[in-house]
Image (cartoon, rainbow, N blue to C red):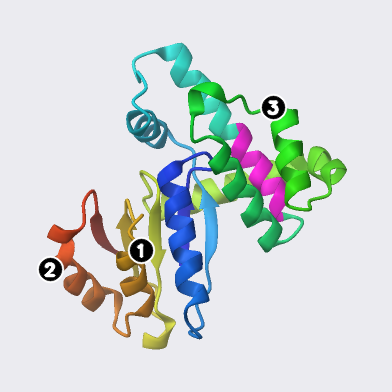
Amino acid sequence: MFLFINPIGQLCLRSEKALLKIIGETDANIHFKFIPVLNLKNVEHYMQFQKQNSRDLDLRNHVFSTIYEAVLAYKAATFQGSKKSQSFLMQLQQAFQQPEDMVLDNELVLSIAKQVGLDTEMLLEDWHSPLTKEAFDSDQQLSCEMNIQTTPSAVVFNYLKGESESGLLIENCDSYDLLKQACYAETTPEQTYQSLQKQKRNVSRVALHVLP
């Protein structure tokens, strides 16, 4: 599973917690990766969720730049291991529960980095490095290839059903039950899609697609 996220998003934090809980509850072999996304539609979606005025260009630019800096900080943290970087990401999202009061600066990033046991000197060195920006560009390319428009979105591949490149895209997937069913499905993406479509009326803000 690829879980596409906003590094300051509250729905994404909920989705990440749900996925980690699911993985902790099963012995199934579930591989996952958090992929940060930055695009204009995602910024618009975030501002609407936070009840911010998306027509305020100064505010929109501020949100865009904040997400960009958070993406780079998270990508820099991934160089120090997945568990610490996941904790860093989730603590950062937690800090932005009241975004109007928050500023993403060195003090906040280093404070969270210390809490989760990251090497702060290394993090500062990597934060805006060419390697980090290359990793960001690679994530952006992947999100474009998978047609990710908003977050949280999950793309699930079931390799028990062969080496098909088809995947199931679930947009706005902050539902524990929905993610659990998608993770545990022993069917092809097409079959899982048909099953989830029948239940879609019970889940708000969800769109389901099968990727070719």
Is 89 a magenta residue? no
Looking at the rendering, the stretch of residues picked out in magenta corresponds to 69-78
Report the amino acid beneath label 2. Lys
Q: Position of residue 206 (x, y in %)?
A: 24, 53
10 Å crowding of disc 2: few (<14), some (14-19), many (20+): few
Circle 2 residue: 198
The residue that mark 3 highlights is: 105
Q: Which residue is mark 1?
A: 176
Identity of the residue furthest to the right in this view: 121
Q: Nearer the viewer, residue 68 or 143?
A: 68
The alpha-carbon separation of the residues under discs 1 and 2 comes to: 17 Å
For the residue labelled by badge 1, is the local secondary structure a helix, a strand or a loop?
helix
Name the residue rendered at 49%, 30% in the picture. 98
Name the chief secondary structure element in magenta: helix
Q: Where is residue 165, by image quadrant?
A: bottom left
Name which of mark 3 and mark 1 comes first in the sequence.
Answer: 3
Label 2 sits on a secondary structure element that is helix
